[in-house]
Image: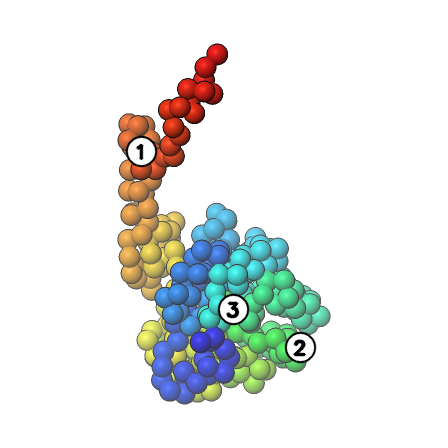
Amino acid sequence: MKNTVTTLLEQKKNNDKITMLTAYDYSTAKLIDEAGINTILVGDSLGMVMLGYEDTISVTMEDMIHHSAAVARGAKNAFIVTDMPFMSYQTSVYDAVFHAGRIMKEGRANAVKLEGGLSVCPQIKAIVEASIPVVAHLGLTPQSVNAFGGFKVQGKDTQAAKRIIEEAKAIEEAGACMVVLECVPEKLATYITKQLSIPTIGIGAGNGCDGQVLVYQDMLAMYSDMTPKFVKHFGEIGEAMKIAFQNYTSEVKSGTFPAPEHSFTISDEVMAEVTKE
């Protein structure tokens, strides 16, 4: 069954946890979709885990559209959320709606995601009025890593915690259909979840949220450049891949691959005809 804004909202009401993983290509999206994951995030984290950037800031609209369209071709049931890259929505309401439209039309997403609270409420409202679902993102917002001075937990003191609560209520009022809470203390995230009528998706925000998201390369131990505290390895796929690559190299060099069962035959008579002088 296709996951939609409505079905995800029903999951919150029924206390049925929402599952979300990132994907950036057709084959991975197809596997995630077949596993029954509710939501796929085409995150701008692709800048680091797919393109080798140091952060998400260098990711372009073309990057996001290219990867989003590939994911959409692979996932038939998951609700596809695609990140709006840095400076595609901060500059003006017009730019936000225009770029959100491109992601929906060319990237075939079901919703767009943008970072920020009160400052982007006008953009959220305008995008929603253009009939485009919006997922918000509060707490540690990676596009603002330079302003934060690094990847740090947000909302730990009274003032900061109250601001996140205020912003969560504001983005719901502006029309967001869901909100990602990243690197927010568990008790604070749980409180926000109870205050909102829209689903909350946690990443480093404890199990009191309505759902969880992880970068799939992180949870499969495929990306070792950095390992946040909130990551759990659900499979050592990175190590398994390295072993497979090494086994392949060994067999090619020794001549044991390809074996006869991997090769095609031709009759000796035909070979005699084509090789005679």
With 256 as the anchor, is 130 left or right in this view? right
Type of the residue with mark 3 = Val
Q: Is residue 64 visible?
A: no
Sequence order check: which comes first, mark 2 or mark 3?
3
- Distance Cα–Cα, label 2 vs label 1: 59 Å
The reply to whether dot 3 and dot 1 touch (C-beta < 8 Å) is: no
Q: Residue at x 40, y 30 (%)?
A: 266
Tell me the number on the disc at residue 144: none
- Badge 3: residue crowd in 10 Å (few <14, some 14–19, many ≥20): many
- Number of the label disc, if any, that sits on residue 81: 3
**Residue depth check, mark 3 versus mark 1: number of the one nearer the observer:** 1
Residue 234 is situated, as x and y percent measured from the top left of the image, at: 29, 60
Q: Residue at x 37, y 24 (%)?
A: 268
CB within 8 Å, label 2 to label 1? no
Tag count in the figure? 3
Residue 260 — which label?
A: 1
Q: Amino acid at mark 1?
A: Pro
Which amino acid is tagged 2?
Ala
Residue drawn at x 38%, y 28% as measured from the top left: 267
Mark linked to residue 130 = 2
Disc 2 crowd rating (10 Å Cα; few below 14, some 14-19, many 20+) is few
Give the quarter of the image for residue 126: bottom right
Residue most toward the top? 277
Q: Mark 3 and mark 1: span between their CA atoms?
A: 46 Å
